[in-house]
Image: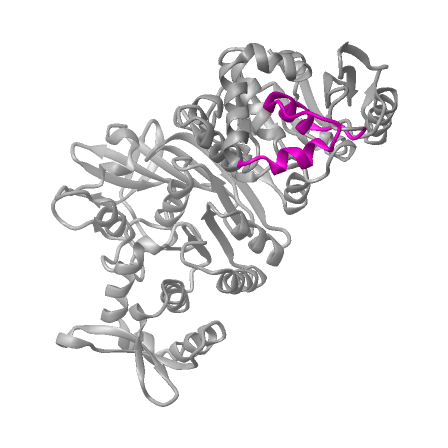
């Protein structure tokens, strides 16, 4: 379990350290650091590792997602694109991004077992070279193993990248046998009963993801409600990748209360299995639902002020007291000043 | 003075203020995620109408200072029961509670306020009347001292024995009588009600005459 995340010059956060729980719900204004926290946690295990998206390494995925126009490169990971280095600290592990001209060299602060990484020194600290995030070639590394508990980020914004991956990896995914379970699971929340999921050609021959009904007919996943579609894809990614930590940005997006309750139930199962969940939301209803299913969940109200990440921990019993007193966690940044 | 809702009063106050004057909401509501630290709080013991009246009165007072505002689920004296929750995370210097007088005499109201404060562990001295229907209490909560100002809604001779915020509104509308002021107010059409709000906004002298205790009590939040 990840207990502590420390950021230094990472994206918009100049400095900040937060504590995480089994289920942590990040609540805060726009631009208060929530997504930055999730992206840091997504990168931390190893920016060069493959994840179930296309592009397949985390760093390339985030670079593609954040890309505007045609620019390449990874300097968006360091504060104001100019900081000399950025650090993501997860418990005792530090991933260091060092700016070398237009590139970022990535180091870690310990030598992983059975692997020999090139030793270097940054600010008199011993570090080990992991690879280079360049501007032209794809990310280069000799090591894509894990430095911290493995994480997977889920988000509406990544759904297109997930689709690309599912199409490419469908044989492996379908043969592992969980597509039918996901189809049956989601059938509890929609009018139709799906028996399985398939990837087949749609008009024009392009491959598409379908839900299959018991009579053999198919419904294209993109034609289902956005919430069902999102849940099915995210659930497939999870079952396929089985990360120790699930990250979900804007968890309420597209989910009606019934499906949101189901997601909360799923999170409760993950927590019971010893996994960890970190989500962000703007919805008080989502906060209530998630804290109902996971009693020892923690709400972290975040605020980014002059680049300093501030936060406040709010437990469910305090949320109930706040509710009676007319205090909404989404408006609670004043308590952080 | 600017107000910063601690809950989604922002939507309610914002939409109603916008209906009165489109230029106002941004000015009186401070909703920036990172405002300057806050040391004062307004607690609404009753809800409807009070929120907008308070916003409009605050608009006239104390420059750019920002105060927090909250509406607990409990009403009137019940709202006092939530005071400790507000102090958990911010040590306010002054808290203004606004509540309807209803049919309580002021000495009885004073006794009830002190009783409620004691019940939740807030020590307080005998209340001082600092203006008509404005009471002030020096309070101590776990070593933190603060002033509680209680502003009591109601006007003598308006609205029968059951006094409330609508006493003030119907007086400003020029329809005050012996009947229940809430009923009278609710029978007015939307345009007339909006004109009354505009009067509070645009004619400070008139507003100060009718909402004297609100100007006196909220003015202390400077």
Of the pair B185 and A32, the residue shown nearer to us: B185
**Can residue B37 be seen in the rendering of this structure?**
no
What residue is shown at x 78% (from left), y 16% (from top)?
B137
Report x, y in % for residue B157.
Answer: 77, 21
Residue B142 occupies which quadrant of the picture?
top right
Residue B151 occupies which quadrant of the picture?
top right
Residue B177 in magenta?
yes
Q: In the shown orientation, is residue A179 left or right of residue A312?
A: left
Q: State the quadrant of the C terminus of chain B.
A: top right
The number of numbered badges drawn on the structure is: 0
What residue is shown at x 60% (from left), y 59% (from top)?
A293
Q: In the shown orientation, is residue A240 left or right of residue B167?
A: left
- What's the magenta region? B161-189
Report x, y in % for residue B58.
Answer: 56, 18
Residue A3 in magenta?
no
Report x, y in % for residue A270.
Answer: 53, 62
What residue is shown at x 48% (from left), y 29% (from top)?
B17
């Amino acid at each position: 379990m990840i207990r502590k995340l420390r950021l230094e010059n990472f994206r918009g956060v100049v400095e900040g350290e937060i504590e995480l729980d089994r289920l942590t719900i990040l609540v805060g204004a726009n631009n208060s650091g929530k997504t930055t926290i999730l992206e840091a946690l997504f990168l931390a295990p190893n920016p060069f590792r493959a994840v179930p998206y296309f592009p397949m390494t985390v760093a390339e995925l985030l670079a593609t997602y954040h890309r505007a126009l045609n620019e390449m490169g990874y300097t968006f990971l360091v504060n104001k694109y100019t900081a000399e280095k950025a650090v993501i600290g997860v418990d005792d592990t530090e991933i260091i991004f060092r700016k070398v001209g237009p590139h970022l060299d990535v180091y870690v602060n310990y030598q992983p077992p059975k692997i020999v990484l090139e030793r270097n020194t940054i600010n008199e600290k011993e570090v080990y070279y992991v690879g280079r995030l360049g501007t032209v070639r794809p990310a280069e590394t000799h090591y894509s193993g894990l430095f911290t508990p493995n994480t997977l980020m889920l988000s509406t914004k990544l759904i297109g990248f997930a689709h690309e991956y599912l199409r490419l990896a469908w044989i492996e995914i379908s043969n592992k046998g969980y597509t039918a379970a996901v189809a049956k699971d989601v059938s509890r929340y929609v009018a139709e009963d799906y028996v399985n999921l398939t990837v087949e050609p749609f008009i024009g021959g392009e491959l598409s993801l379908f839900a299959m009904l018991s009579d053999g007919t198919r419904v294209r996943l993109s034609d289902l409600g956005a919430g069902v579609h999102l849940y099915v894809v995210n659930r497939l990614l999870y079952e396929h990748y089985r990360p120790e930590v699930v990250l979900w940005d804007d968890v309420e997006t597209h989910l009606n209360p019934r499906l949101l309750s189901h997601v909360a139930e799923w999170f409760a199962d993950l927590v019971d299995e010893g996994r960890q969940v970190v989500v962000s939301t703007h919805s008080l209803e989502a906060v209530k639902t998630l804290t109902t299913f996971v009693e020892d969940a923690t709400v972290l109200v975040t605020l980014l002020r002059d680049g300093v990440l501030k936060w406040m921990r709010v437990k469910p019993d305090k949320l109930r007291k706040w509710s009676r007193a007319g205090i909404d966690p989404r408006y609670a940044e004043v308590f952080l000043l | 003075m600017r107000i910063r809702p601690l809950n989604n009063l922002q939507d309610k106050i914002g939409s109603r203020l916008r209906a009165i004057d489109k230029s106002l909401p941004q000015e009186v509501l401070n909703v920036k995620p990172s405002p300057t630290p806050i040391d004062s709080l307004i607690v609404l013991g009753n809800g409807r109408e009070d929120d907008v009246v308070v916003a409009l009165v605050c608009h006239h007072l104390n420059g750019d200072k920002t105060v927090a505002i909250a509406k607990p689920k409990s009403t009137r004296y019940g709202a006092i029961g939530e005071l400790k929750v507000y102090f958990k995370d911010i040590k306010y210097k002054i808290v203004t509670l606004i509540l309807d007088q209803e049919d309580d005499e002021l000495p009885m109201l004073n006794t009830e306020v002190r009783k409620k404060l004691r019940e939740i562990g807030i020590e307080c001295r005998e209340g001082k009347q600092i203006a008509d229907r404005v009471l002030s209490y020096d309070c101590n909560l776990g070593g933190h001292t603060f002033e509680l100002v209680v502003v009591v809604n109601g006007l003598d001779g308006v609205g029968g024995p059951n006094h409330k915020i609508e006493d003030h509104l119907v007086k400003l509308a020029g329809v005050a009588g012996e009947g229940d002021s809430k009923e009278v107010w609710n029978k007015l059409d939307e345009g007339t009600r909006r004109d009354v709000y505009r009067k509070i906004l645009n004619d400070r002298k008139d507003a100060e005459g009718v909402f004297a205790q609100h100007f006196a009590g909220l003015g202390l939040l400077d």
